[in-house]
Amino acid sequence: MKIILISIWIAGCLGIKAQSHRFIYDVQYRKDSTQNLMTKENYHLDIDQKEVKYYPRDFYVGDSLITNNIPFGKDMQFNTSGIISHQQGSSTYNDYDVLESVVLKRVANAAQNWKLTGEKKQIKELSVQKAVTSWGGRNWIAWFSPEIPFQEGPYKFHGLPGLIVELYDDKNDYHFELVKNQKLSKPYVNQFIQYMESRSVMVNDEKYKEAKLKYYASPVNYLRNSAGVTRSNEEYYLNDGTLVGENNSREVNERLRESIRKYNNPIEIDTAIRYPSEL
């Protein structure tokens, strides 16, 4: 699958919706709202004739390694934080939250009430227009391009008359920028994503919060039970490659709990779970 420059790709927009497409975004975000340190990652937005999926690029990398029978590197770490999907034209989203070996699935409406402005500019030879909305507890500025006729964007953002090329909130906690695109010969099937979706557990908002607080109370015990580990000295791996066993379980448990408390600045800040510093 050949990566095509955005400026060249525009010329092939005729018949666009009869094909499958991938849009790759650079995502810079502030994990810890009290610090200025920004994290940068790539996310894929895959659009076929019926379904739209948004997921970390690491899912694509892992799937490619397996497909091509290439072993995982010893120090390779993966971001498998979540998967977002919905049917084209629908505001109902499936949100898969990956907690290591546990996958929680929520279904919710994510409609945004956009206000189009008359402000326009060029981004990478694309003509874009500005739109604003308040959603998820944040104020958002989007630049969309009618030249790319998809009413989609990164994460759960959608509904504008063109693909969202750039998106950011007014506190600069999150910044999404379209950097690459591909035309796919057929809808992309990712083994990792299929596996995560198949093992997911459907929860409502109340059960979701309950599960997250239970996970925070003791991540190691939560994951050990979910992985079916029955003996205290039995070892298992975290998604980042950490081997957890009897000798380091306390240390890993505290590291995971500290990370949950510290990195709690989600896109939808109005539904953020507040974790107690002490239990």
Image: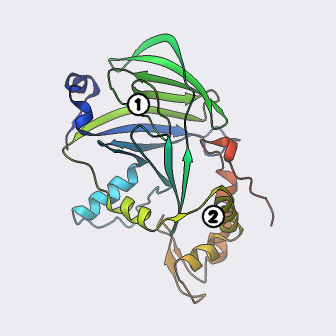
Assign a secondary structure to mark 2: helix
The picture places residue 260, in percent across and down from the top left corner, at 65, 57
Q: Amino acid at mark 1?
A: Gln
User: Which residue is tagged 1?
Assistant: 151
Bin the neighbour count of mark 2 within 10 Å (Cα to Cα): few under 14, some 14-19, many 20 and up. Answer: some
Assign a secondary structure to mark 1: loop
Along the viewing direction, whichever of 215 and 205 lies nearer the viewer: 205
The correct choice, above or below, for 200 with respect to 118 in the image is below
Residue at 26% from the left image edge and 48% from the top image edge:
187
Circle 1/circle 2 CB separation < 8 Å: no
Label 1 to label 2: alpha-carbon separation? 37 Å
- Name the side, left or right, on which 40 lies relative to 140: left
The correct choice, above or below, for 153 with respect to 200 in the image is above
The picture places residue 67, in percent across and down from the top left corner, at 24, 62
Task: Find the residue positioned furthest to the top.
Answer: 118
User: Which residue is tagged 2?
Assistant: 256
Image quadrant in which the C terminus is located: bottom right
- Residue 26's mark? none
The correct choice, above or below, for 58 with respect to 110 in the image is below
Q: Amino acid at mark 2?
A: Leu
The picture places residue 216, in percent across and down from the top left corner, at 68, 65
Mark closer to the observer (1, 2): 1
Count every numbered label the image shows and give the total: 2
Which tag, 1 or 2, sits closer to the chain's start?
Answer: 1
Residue at 48% from the left image edge and 38% from the top image edge:
27
- Name the side, left or right, on which 266 lies relative to 179: right
